[in-house]
Amino acid sequence: MKPKALRKPLISGNWKMNFSHLEAINIVQKFSYGLGVSDPSRVDITLHPPFTALRSVQTVIDADDLPISLGAQDVHWEKSGAFTGEVSAEMLAKLNVSYVIVGHSERRQYFGETDEMVAKKAAAVHAFSMTPIVCVGETLEERDGGDTEGKVLGQLRAGLGLLDADQIARSVIAYEPIWAIGTGRTATPEDAQKVCASIRSAVAADHGAAAGASLRVQYGGSVKAANIEALMAQPDIDGALVGGASLDPAELADIVGRAASAR
């Protein structure tokens, strides 16, 4: 299996429904200043602003040649049509978006997103040469009931169901236990590693050893500078999908620096 050292860490900041386009410009600039004290070349970085700030963030990244990839928080699977309020993969690609989050637990919980929808979104993202970050995770009730693996691997297999092995190898899976998102609670590094290892093993079993070895698996759920090094020390954790902490540019820069040093 591909050694972890050959899988470049990926730190993704998911801003959710925060920041106007002007605020986003300021945050990106402050974040980039903080990166000057670390070695971002050792880690891939993505920022996922709201749709209304994508163009502004893209302009800053391009104008200042920042070592940051632009990401989106969601996408619709259709290329165009009567889907009021939605944004297509082609529209995102035209803005130089590189990564797209699909199947986040908040989309599933608040907007009724199903595994079938997640699969179609992941396929649409690949169709325009972008990378999906496919989110999976269990509720507290499922965790306490001993069904973590069943729930997570069920979401995993469904979400990747329309992709071939090569596309899966180039995808990212974000394991986000729902009970840890925005709660301040974090899975122990050992618990997170156990689930991430199961994800990698399932992909290898279903789609081949090469896909399992190349796939990057992130952890998400109250990630902060104080715990990123312990998470990154685990053999099957290749980065983090950062929520609340990504709203603080100094904290996010610290997370990136620590992740780079840990690798």
Image (cartoon, rainbow, N blue to C red):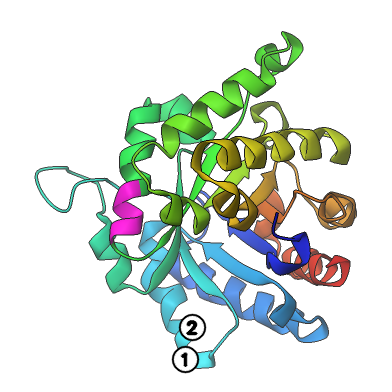
Which is nearer the eye, 30 or 79? 79
Q: Which mark is residue 63?
A: 1
Secondary structure under the numbered disc 1 in the rendered image:
helix
Q: Amino acid at mark 2?
A: Val
What amino acid type is highlighted by mark number 1?
Ala
Task: Reply above or below: 33 against 79.
Answer: below
Judging by the rendered image, the residue that carries numbered circle 2 is 60
Q: Which quadrant: the N terminus?
A: bottom right
Location of residue 241 in the rendering, given as x and y in whole percent from the top left corner: 64, 51
Q: Position of residue 81 (x, y in %)?
A: 10, 47
Left/right placement of residue 236 relative to residue 17 reads right
**Is 194 on the left-hand or right-hand side of 32?**
right
- The alpha-carbon separation of the residues under discs 1 and 2 comes to 5 Å
Using a 10 Å C-alpha cutoff, classify the residue at mark 1 as few (fewer than 14 neighbours), some (14 to 19) or many (20 or more). few
| Quadrant housing the C terminus | bottom right
Relative side of 172 to 120, left or right: right
Work out which residue is located at the far left of the displayed protein and give it.
82
* Closer to us: 209 or 161: 209
Q: Are marks 1 and 2 in contact (CB under 8 Å)?
A: yes
Horizontal and vertical percent position of residue 79: 17, 53
* Residue at screen point 67% across, 36% down: 181
Magenta residues (range) = 123-127
Where is residue 232? Give x, y as percent. Answer: 82, 55
Residue 205 visible to the viewer: yes
In which quarter of the view is residue 187 placed? top right
